Amino acid sequence: MESQPKFQPDPKLKLMDQIREVLRYHHYAYRTEQTYCQWVLRYIRFFGGKVHPRDLSSHHIERFLSELAVKREVSASTQRQALNALAFLYREVLNIPLDRKIQPVRSKKTPKLPTVLGKEEIKKFFQHIEGTHALMAKLLYGSGLRLMECVRLRIKDLDFDRKRIHVLGKGNKWRSTILAEPIISQLQSHIKHVKALHHCDLEEGFGEVYIPVALGRKYKNAAMETRWQYVFPSKKRSADPRSGSVRRHHVLESGIQKAVKRAAHKAGIDKRTTCHTLRHSFATTMLENGINIRMLQELLGHADVKTTERYTHVMDKDISQLTSPLEGLDL
């Protein structure tokens, strides 16, 4: 069976437009598109801004990445992101195989223990956050969602009968996590308002929401259906930066980020508190409540159980209740 020919961007386009064309052909997220383009621009500017990447080599990529590590002191994940962007540029856009493995000076990967909030801190925190932001924060803490997983939730992802949330996580992988009983009625009330907003959009000739391209081709009317609408829609409609279609997108993540930071400050919490802190707190509390670590791994959507095991280092362990193996022995 012959392999499909590789997609080639329009050679008449400028380089950055070629990159966008290929990224969109492969259905990369808009956020990834922006990030990759920014890294390619930084790479070009690093070598004076006048040399085309096709005239640069593996050696130049290593110089650029090493500069990030040594002088810019970026994190290991940031350096890896830059490498991924440049590898995509040469492999998918320029169709130029790199002559050898890229081996820059590596950024130091310093292990960090996750910051978690105790029960009293959580209580104080929720006394200082309200409205939709409070509901989103309860999902982060009560279900262990990542920030963007919460922001991108669709109505169809909530299963009230089984008390589950179906989550599209990293790497476009689906998983299920728990839907906490205390917020079910709040969520149902919130969704009534979302449905009413969608009904108004439809009456005004709008009502379309972003859905994956392939799905849109298969189900022509899916983008207008209620079940595909975001649980947390933006207040205003806006033009899609790629297609130009006027849609109601999800809320910006900056709103909940600011609300969480503000609530933590008002609650007098001295720890650095972010949206991800609430997810960390969910994981640690679940371990303290006796959940199996493999089950927790599935709830959190971790590819490697080692990532989940970090939480065992910060969970509250009552050492005074432990029994030494020496006890009970007649020595």
Image (cartoon, rainbow, N blue to C red):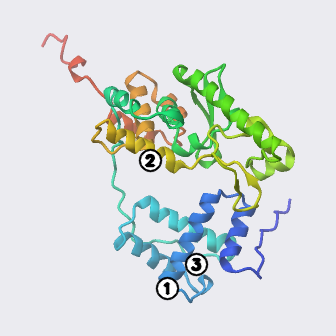
In the image, which disc is placed on residue 258? 2
| Residue neighbourhood size for the residue with mark 1, other residues' Cα within 10 Å, grouped as few (<14), some (14–19), many (≥20) | some
Whether residue 151 is situated above or below residue 96 in the rendered picture: above
Residue 66 visible to an observer of this rendering: yes
Question: What's the residue type where badge 2 is placed?
Answer: Lys
- Asked which quadrant contains residue 173, the reply is top right
Q: Distance between the residues labelled 1 and 2?
A: 37 Å
How many marks the image carries: the answer is 3
311 versus 327 height, above or below: below
Of residues 240 and 66, which is closer to you in this image? 240
SS for dot 2: helix
Kind of element beneath mark 1: loop
Residue of label 3? 99
Circle 3 Cα neighbour tier, 10 Å, few/some/many (<14 / 14–19 / ≥20): few
**On the rendered image, what quadrant is the N terminus found in?**
bottom right
Q: Disc 3 versus disc 1: distance between alpha carbons?
A: 19 Å
Residue 321: x %, y % from top left: 24, 17
The image shows residue 100 at horizontal and vertical percentages of 55, 75
Q: Residue at x 51, y 67 (%)?
A: 82
Q: From the viewer's side, name the closer residue of 124 and 219.
A: 124
Lower position in the chain sequence, tag 3 or tag 1: 1
Question: How far apart are the two marked residues, 3 and 2, measured between alpha carbons?
Answer: 46 Å
